[in-house]
């Protein structure tokens, strides 16, 4: 199944060119390994309005079936990705965010500090992952089994469930 995936990295330093986007690279590599299409990739600073604008553009223009954000989900004062995401969601998918945190605990107790969320805008699933490469790797292990099924559901296709 062809799934279009867009990757949004949220990082002040990454956007300013002072930090390599390793988490975005890890996501892009995963997209390629899965045989999916990387339909968008951007880096924005930790600014609610800029994050929300990209999410809205990609979802409303049907650029992607799945948008994965990386970064800005922690407890820091500039970590605003969950707030920007919630502002544009039409429906939340709390089970995804809960699974990401729970599965991440196998590798680090800090996974519970992630405030990431997940949900739907239009026919697009939006999922927040942490900014660290290890958090992204853990996240894609959790997401991999559900991506195609979720895309089919959002497209209105009949599924076996």
Image (tube, rainbow, N blue to C red):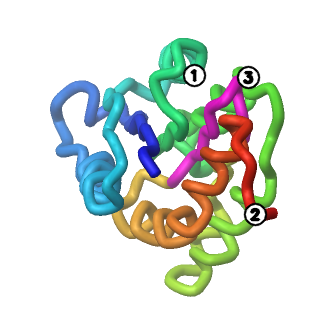
Mark 1 = which residue? Answer: 59
| Kind of element beneath mark 3 | helix
- Return the residue nearer the eye: 9 or 56: 56
Mark 3 = which residue? Answer: 87
- Where is residue 63? Give x, y as percent: 46, 23
Magenta stretch holds residue 126: yes
Q: Which residues are magenta?
A: 119-129
**In front: mark 1 or mark 3?**
1
| Kind of element beneath mark 2 | loop
What is the C-alpha distance between the residues marked 1 and 2? 26 Å
Q: Which mark is residue 160?
A: 2
Q: Residue at x 63, y 65 (%)?
A: 100
Q: Residues within 10 Å of mark 1 (few under 14, many from 20)?
A: many
- Where is residue 23? Give x, y as percent: 32, 53
Q: Residue at x 54, y 36 (%)?
A: 65
159 horizontally vs 44: left or right: right
- Above or below residue 11? Residue 133 is below
- Return the residue nearer the eye: 19 or 23: 23
**In front: mark 3 or mark 2?**
2
Q: Residue at x 27, y 27 (%)?
A: 15
- Where is residue 154? Give x, y as percent: 70, 38
Q: Is residue 103 visible?
A: yes
Q: Residues within 10 Å of mark 3 (few under 14, many from 20)?
A: few
Q: Is residue 49 visible?
A: no
**In front: mark 1 or mark 2?**
2
**N-term-proximal mark, 1 vs 3:** 1
């Amino acid at each position: 199944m062809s799934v279009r995936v867009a990757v949004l990295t949220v990082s002040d330093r990454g956007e300013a060119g002072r930090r390599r986007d390793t988490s975005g690279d890890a996501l892009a590599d995963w997209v390629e390994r899965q045989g999916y299409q990387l339909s968008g990739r951007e880096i924005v600073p930790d600014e609610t309005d800029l994050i929300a604008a990209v999410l809205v553009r990609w979802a409303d223009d049907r650029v992607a079936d799945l948008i994965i954000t990386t970064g800005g989900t922690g407890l820091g004062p500039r970590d605003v990705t969950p707030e920007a995401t919630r502002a544009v969601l039409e429906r939340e998918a709390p089970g995804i965010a809960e699974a990401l945190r729970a599965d991440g605990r196998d590798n680090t107790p800090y996974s519970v500090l992630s405030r990431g969320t997940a949900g739907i805008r239009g026919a697009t699933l939006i999922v927040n992952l942490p900014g660290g490469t290890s958090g992204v790797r853990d996240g894609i292990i959790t997401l991999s089994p559900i991506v195609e099924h979720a895309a089919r559901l959002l497209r209105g296709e009949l599924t076996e469930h």
